[in-house]
Image: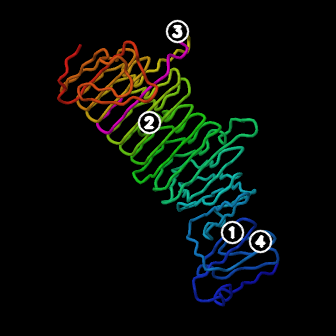
């Protein structure tokens, strides 16, 4: 087969001296090459080779030259109703392949040496993104709106670090669905599914609607950096379903779910960093859960909070605001947790009591504002040592809270001084406003502590 080399740069120079890009279009997928990196292009009867990548001529729908620069190591996906277009930087030809079916995009990443950035934009009511690879990657959500009626909106099977950047000044919305039978695959586990560990950044907004199961699943840790804007998750099951650990340093996070709000499980590797933990050091988190036996926040190991604002509400029977299978330490910030349901399966084999804060091991408070209230059970259910050495604390319950000790500040427990425990509750200048619908009209129990406390136990 005879081949010949064409000086493609002559064609590009003829278009002007501005930086040029050669676009090789194969259906809805475009490979974009900077002109100054092309060199010679080898042409055979049925093949075209550019920068070491060979294309079948029959697969090329068109070729065009423009002045739109495409950075190396980037892939962009633009959704437009029932269609999607993909532009892949020329240096990734042979590394990233794309298949497009309507607005459903599949990206397969081969062996790469540098991190690849995938940018998603546009809108589709019947679209999705599936990606598989073996190198850490960044996904920029640039005002993308995706609704997949039969599976996950975004399904990332790359098991490495996945950075998700919310583009400043934009709102992205992801919605999943299920029109057929649930086959139990990863595609049906979450609206936004990440096989690896997930790191959020960027000042934009993200709305996730998990209609099938979880809103977000991160198969390893989930980190929300200080720069994160706002994330809202509405889910049929858990809001954040995370393995290893959940760490929040910033952001405005809102979860509305029928399952757990934040659910963190320890991995099988006991030596994994922060395994099973929740760590809060900034930002705001509001989690409201409505299902029976649902927990607004739960973890298999330690809960640690040093700053930020956390508001937890569980309304179903047997629900809990904060459930910790290990120990808990709060040194700063503001946290409140309220449960409004009754006992689930009372005296039965599946009985669950709706304590507001339930901890299996030791608890230490050294600072912050801490308010927990349960209409029918304990505000604080602590199985280990309960130590209060700082902070402003108010616990309210239909049952008496476990008794804390203190080395440095007074704590007292009492029956309610109000006829009803509802609305704004005040004890010795410690004030907490209970949510609408919360009421203990008979005997209620109060635990209160703060610096300089003067009230006496009753």
Residue 60 circle label: 4
Q: Position of residue 193 (x, y in %)?
A: 59, 44
Query: Which of 90/299 is in front?
Result: 299
Q: Decide: is 446 above or below 57.
A: above
Marks 3 and 4: CB-CB under 8 Å?
A: no
Which residue is label 1 attached to? 30
What is the distance, in whole Å, between disc 1 and disc 4 at their CAs?
Answer: 10 Å
Query: Which of 374/149 is in front?
Result: 374
* Number of the front mark, 1 or 3: 3
* Number of the front mark, 2 or 1: 1
First in sequence: mark 4 vs mark 2? 4
Marks 1 and 4: CB-CB under 8 Å?
A: no
333 magenta-colored: yes
What is the distance, in whole Å, between disc 3 and disc 4 at their CAs?
Answer: 70 Å
Q: Position of residue 347 (x, y in %)?
A: 52, 9
Looking at the rendering, which quadrant does residue 274 occupy?
Answer: top left
What is the distance, in whole Å, between disc 2 and disc 3 at their CAs?
Answer: 33 Å
Q: How many marks?
A: 4
First in sequence: mark 3 vs mark 4? 4
Dot 2: element: loop
Q: Decide: is 234 above or below 202.
A: above
Which residue is label 2 attached to? 275
Dot 3: element: loop
Q: Tag 3: Cα neighbours inside 10 Å, few (<14), some, or many (≥20)? A: few
- The residue depicted at 51 percent of the width and 20 percent of the height is 318
Which residue is label 3 attached to? 347
Marks 2 and 1: CB-CB under 8 Å?
A: no
What is the distance, in whole Å, between disc 1 and disc 3 at their CAs?
Answer: 64 Å
Magenta span covers which residues? 327-346
């Amino acid at each position: 087969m005879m081949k010949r080399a064409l000086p493609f740069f002559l064609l590009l120079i003829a278009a002007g001296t501005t930086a040029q890009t050669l676009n090789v279009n194969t259906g809805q997928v475009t490979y974009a090459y900077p002109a100054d990196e092309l060199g010679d292009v080898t042409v055979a009867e049925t093949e075209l080779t550019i920068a070491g990548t060979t294309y079948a001529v029959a697969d090329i729908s068109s070729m065009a030259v423009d002045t739109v620069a495409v950075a190396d190591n980037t892939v962009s996906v633009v959704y437009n109703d029932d269609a999607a277009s993909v532009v892949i930087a020329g240096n990734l030809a042979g590394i990233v392949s794309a298949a497009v079916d309507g607005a459903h995009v599949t990206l397969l990443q081969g062996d790469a040496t540098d991190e690849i950035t995938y940018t998603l934009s546009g809108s589709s009511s019947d679209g999705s993104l599936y990606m598989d690879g073996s190198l850490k990657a960044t996904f920029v959500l640039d005002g993308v709106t995706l609704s997949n009626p039969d599976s996950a909106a975004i399904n990332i099977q790359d098991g490495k670090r996945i950075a998700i950047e919310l583009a400043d000044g934009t709102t992205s919305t992801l919605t999943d669905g299920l029109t057929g039978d649930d086959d139990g695959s990863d595609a049906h586990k979450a609206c936004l599914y990440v096989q690896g560990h997930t790191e959020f950044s960027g000042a934009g907004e993200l709305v996730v609607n998990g209609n099938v199961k979880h809103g977000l699943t991160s198969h390893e840790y989930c980190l929300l950096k200080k720069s994160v804007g706002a994330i809202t998750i509405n889910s049929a099951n858990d809001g954040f379903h995370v393995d290893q650990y959940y760490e929040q340093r910033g952001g405005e996070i809102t979860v509305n779910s029928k399952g757990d709000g934040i659910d963190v499980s320890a991995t099988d590797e006991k030596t994994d960093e922060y395994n099973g933990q929740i760590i809060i050091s900034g930002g705001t988190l509001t989690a409201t859960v409505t299902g029976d036996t649902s927990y607004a926040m739960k973890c298999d190991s330690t809960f640690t909070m040093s700053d930020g604002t956390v508001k937890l509400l569980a309304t179903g029977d047997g629900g809990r605001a904060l459930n910790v299978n290990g120990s808990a330490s709060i040194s700063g910030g503001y946290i409140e947790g309220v449960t409004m349901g009754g006992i689930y399966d009372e005296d039965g084999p599946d009985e669950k009591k709706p304590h507001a804060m339930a901890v299996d091991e030791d608890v230490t408070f050294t600072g912050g504002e801490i308010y927990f209230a349960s209409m029918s059970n304990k505000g604080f259910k602590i199985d280990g040592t309960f130590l209060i050495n700082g902070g402003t604390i108010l616990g309210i319950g239909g049952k008496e809270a476990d008794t804390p000790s203190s080395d440095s500040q007074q704590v007292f427990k009492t029956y309610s001084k109000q006829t009803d425990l509802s609305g704004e509750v005040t004890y010795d200048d410690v004030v907490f406003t209970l949510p609408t619908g919360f009421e203990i009209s008979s005997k209620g129990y109060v635990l209160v502590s703060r610096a300089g406390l003067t009230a006496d136990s009753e």
